[in-house]
Amino acid sequence: MSKNKRPRGRIFRYRPWIQLGAAIGTNAHLRGFLTGRIYSGELKTACVPGLNCYSCPGAVGSCPIGAMQAVISGNKLNFSYYVFGILILFGVLLGRLICGFLCPFGWIQQLLNKVPLPNLRINPKIDRPARFLKYGVLVLFVLALPAFLVDGFGLGAPWFCKWICPAGTLEGGIPLVLANESLRSGLGFLFWWKLGLLILTIASSMVIYRPFCKYVCPLGAFYALFNRVSLTRMELSRSRCVSCGHCEQVCPMQVQVLKNINSTECIRCGRCAQACPADAIALHFGKIRLKENSLAEPGK
């Protein structure tokens, strides 16, 4: 087979299966969906890397954002070394590769974007400032409010999980309500508010690639802080690059690949590597250069 005709993405063409495996693996307590009971075994003390609701009947690990809020709101700023340490470790090793490969809610948005509707590419003048919203959500709803807005016992509320997170409604709220009649009889404003946010997220995901990841997700914002220094990173060979711009045209996260391939918005999906006619883009882990186009994936 000639060099120009060799198959691309031979390894990471299995990315959809990795995403499916991650979603099933983090929600392996399938019995919980039938009983409406939340798993509370020892595994629940460990954080999974992606956004996955603690209250999902199938969840076998803790959501990192939920754990972060619990630590902050329950210990009066005496941060848990474990929770923040494991998140920093995830960030240093993988960066936002977690968003592209291991996050169940990111995968759900990606599937919704396959609905045959016109895709909207947001004007950069609106898109780029809007990307900073997720950092505001991280600072305000995950860190500040749980820490400083506390009750008489010095305990704060999980503001992001309670008022914003659509993943919690989809994975936890709806399954628990369907399985427990007592919960159905007590539904109030909060449930319907969050259901509305979920519907908005689902509808927008059909026409915008991963809108929650781009504009709202505080976990994506946290991992983004490590994207330029993480061991897993994309590399652009300037000697090979022909500046055709195909990589930027196909990037679903609207990264300026030629200017900053390891942007805080890059989720390492490999679409840029797939489109590159000069094999100028490759995935690296530390100093190890993996096979070029190894992250490529057909379609979205």
Image (spheres, helix red, strand yellow):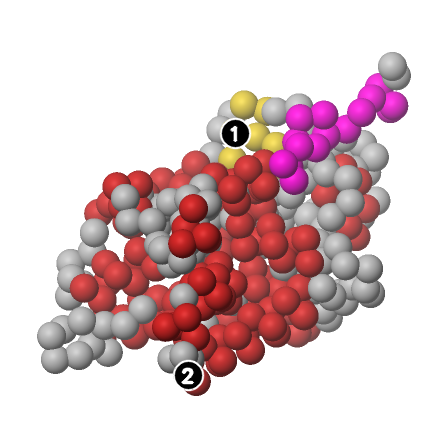
Horizontal and vertical percent for residue 219? 44, 56
* Quadrant of the frame with the N terminus: top right
Horizontal and vertical percent for residue 198? 56, 70
Q: Is residue 3 visible?
A: yes
On whether residue 10 falls in the magenta region, the answer is yes
Look at mark 2 in the image and give the residue it sits on: 188
Horizontal and vertical percent for residue 296? 71, 36
| SS state under label 1 | strand
Closest to the observer, 56 or 93: 56
State which region is magenta. 3-17
- Is residue 143 rendered to the left or right of residue 260? left
Badge 2: residue crowd in 10 Å (few <14, some 14–19, many ≥20): few
Q: Which mark is residue 296?
A: none
Badge 1: residue crowd in 10 Å (few <14, some 14–19, many ≥20): some
- Is residue 147 rendered to the left or right of residue 211? left
Single out the mark in the foreground, 1 or 2: 2
Q: Is residue 6 above or below residue 250?
A: above
Looking at the image, is mark 1 or mark 2 earlier in the sequence?
Answer: 2
Residue at the image point whose x is 35% and y is 54% from the top: 38
Horizontal and vertical percent for residue 121? 75, 65
Look at mark 1 in the image and give the residue it sits on: 285
